[in-house]
Image (cartoon, rainbow, N blue to C red):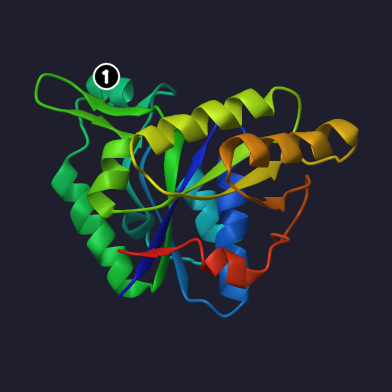
Amino acid sequence: MSKGLFITGTDTDIGKTYVTALIVKTMRQAGYNAGYYKAAISGAPTVAASDAGFVNKFADIHEPEDMILSYLYQHAVSPHLAAKLEGHPLEKEVILQAWKRVTEAYPYVTMEGSGGIVCPIRHDEKAHYYLTDIIGWLHLPVLVVADAGLGTINHVVTTCEYIKNRHIPIKGIILNNWQGGVMEEDNVKMIEEITGVKVIALVKKGDTILHCDPKVLEGCYAEV
């Protein structure tokens, strides 16, 4: 039985892909046979030049492109709009089959979301899919990535409330771009107090490994 974990962010461009790569690399270096998967990426010319390509290389997975990503869109817009513009909407069965394939290959699979948690993936006359739908299909718990700086309390709390209201378990929070100091230390305290969710790691620019006990990371994954 494989275990999975879904990585989401409080917004786009907050370092979700970088942190995801650190998670997978840390797991692999600790002896866990960990893989990676992403359903859809928009705004990249090739898989190799995309978020998925970065994780594939950084974490030393080196899987074929169709193993790590199902949908690549050229337009740098939300996947649902890119799919409309390019005439290639995401299909539920494609995601389910891709997930089956990667979970058969790896006992631990980290799935990265697209943008923030309220990201529409498909929105047309035939279907309306959001990231939370994919999380539900695959029965995944969530780990939230956020920036460590000013404004993050509101972003993390609202993201966590949205996830909790959909009865999706949150396993932890990771703060990126950590510099330390009174404000950022207080951000950790307030985030944990308001959400009831533990900040499990702090990531500085240039980190090549996640400073988190691999056993704590392993505990974030759930059977799928």
Q: Of residues 201 and 22, which is closer to you in this image?
A: 201
The quadrant holding residue 217 is bottom right
Res 50 visible: no
Identify the residue shown where x is 38% and y is 56%.
68
Q: Is residue 211 left or right of residue 23?
A: right
Looking at the image, residue 161 lies above or below residue 142: above
Quarter that holds the C terminus: bottom left
Query: Where is residue 66 drawn, in percent x and y?
Result: 31, 56
Quarter that holds the N terminus: bottom left
Q: Of residues 87 and 211, which is closer to you in this image?
A: 211
Q: Residue furthest bottom?
A: 31
Can you identify the residue that label 1 sits on?
A: 85
Q: Which amino acid does label 1 sit on?
A: Leu
Q: Of residues 1 and 65, which is closer to you in this image?
A: 1
Identify the residue shown where x is 49% and y is 51%.
53
Q: Is residue 56 left or right of residue 151?
A: left
Q: How crowded is mark 1: few (under 14 residues within 10 Å), some or many (20 or more)?
A: some
Res 206 visible: yes
Q: Of residues 57 and 145, which is closer to you in this image?
A: 145
Query: Where is residue 183 drawn, in percent x and y?
Result: 84, 31
Looking at the image, residue 186 lies above or below residue 202: above
Query: Where is residue 162 drawn, in percent x and y?
Result: 42, 30
